Amino acid sequence: MKTPRCTALLAVVVGIGLAGCSSTEAATTEKSSEYADLAASVTCTNLRTKNPDLNGKTLKNAINPYTPGYETVNPENPSEYHGFDIDLGNALGACLGFNNDYVPVGFSELIPTVASGQADWIISNLYATKERAAGGVDFISYSKVFDGILVAKGNPKKITGIDTSLCGLTVGLNKGYVEVPLVEGVGPACAAAGLKAPTVSLFDSSADCTQAVLAGRADAYMNDINTVNGFVAAHPDKLDSAETVMLDYTIGIGVPQGKHEFRDAIQAALTEVQSSGLQDKLAAKWQLTENAVAKPTILSVS
C-alpha cells in the first residue's frame, strides 16, 4: 500500500539529509479496501468498540525511511512512503479505526521521538531490547531476527560471522544498532589472538552503510537479512551476503511507556493480523523471504 508523506522530505531524495519532519498535512484520510476483511472481523470490530478513543484518530508513526522492503520513499511518487512496515501499520489502523501519519527521523532518534511525545508509536524494523525499552517505550514483537552480513562480491575478506573473522576490519553500522556492541565485543578475542579489534564506522542510514561497502570504506555491513538481500539484488555484480546470523531478539512495535490500553490494543490487533495470514502475505508482497512470524509478546521494563 502506498501512503502519503510530507513533501518537505523530498529533499532526502536528492541527497539532502533532514533530521525530521512532521507530515501532519499529509495524513492518510481514506480507508483502503485492501484491509476491509480484516476490519470487518469480529476481533477488530470488538477492538474498535473497546477502544473508541482510537476511532477516526490520526497517529504519528516515527520511522527511519531508508530500509528497502520495510520503509522507504516511493521512487514512483516521492510524496509517499511504502514498504512492509507501512502496510502493517495501515492494517493495524484499519483494525483499530485510526489513520497513520509519519515523522521521519534518524534511526537513533526513533525511541526519543516517541518517548518525548513527538510521535505516537514506532513501526520501523526496530529490534526489541531491554536497553531500548529503558529509553521510554514498551515493545510488541512481531518477527524473529535473522541478520545478514553485506560484503563485497566474493567475500574477499572471508567474513564468517560476528566473530574473529572481523579482526582488523572496518564494519559499517547504523547509529544505535544492536550490532554495534556485538561487533565491539569481538575485540577481546582479537586481542587474545594477537590481532587488531574491528573498527566500527557509524552512519545514519542503511543506504550510507551500503555505499561505504561499495566504496571500499567498510568491509562489511550488518542488518536484517531481507535488507541485505535487497542490497545484493540491487548490486549483484558488486555485493554479496557473507553469512546469516540468528540474533536473540525480535522485531517489535514501540509504544510509549504507560499507555497500556493502546499497547494492549496493538497487541490484540497484531494477533488478529497474524491469525488471518495477512502478515505473511505482506512479507511475500515485499519479498521479505526470511520474515519469520513471532507471537506478539510484550517487552517492558516499566
Image: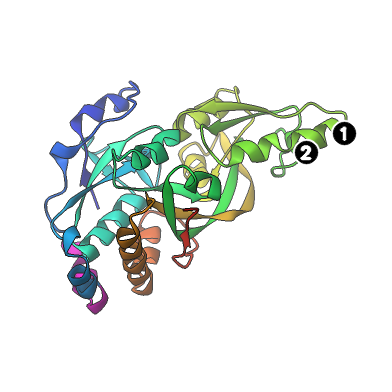
Q: Position of residue 268 (x, y in %)?
A: 34, 69
Query: How many numbered discs?
Result: 2
Q: Which residue is mark 1?
A: 193
Q: Position of residue 259 (x, y in %)?
A: 33, 55
For the residues bearing labels 2 and 1, Cβ distance under 8 angstroms = yes
User: Is residue 187 among what the camera can see?
Assistant: yes
Pick the front one: 226 or 142: 142
User: Is residue 155 among what the camera can see?
Assistant: no
Find residue 164 and name its label. Answer: 2
Q: Position of residue 127 (x, y in %)?
A: 50, 49
Disc 2 marks which amino acid? Answer: Thr
Secondary structure type for disc 1? loop
Where does the magenta region start and end? 32-43
Residue that appears at 26% across and 41% down: 102
Residue that appears at 36% across and 53% down: 258
Residue that appears at 26% across and 31% down: 21
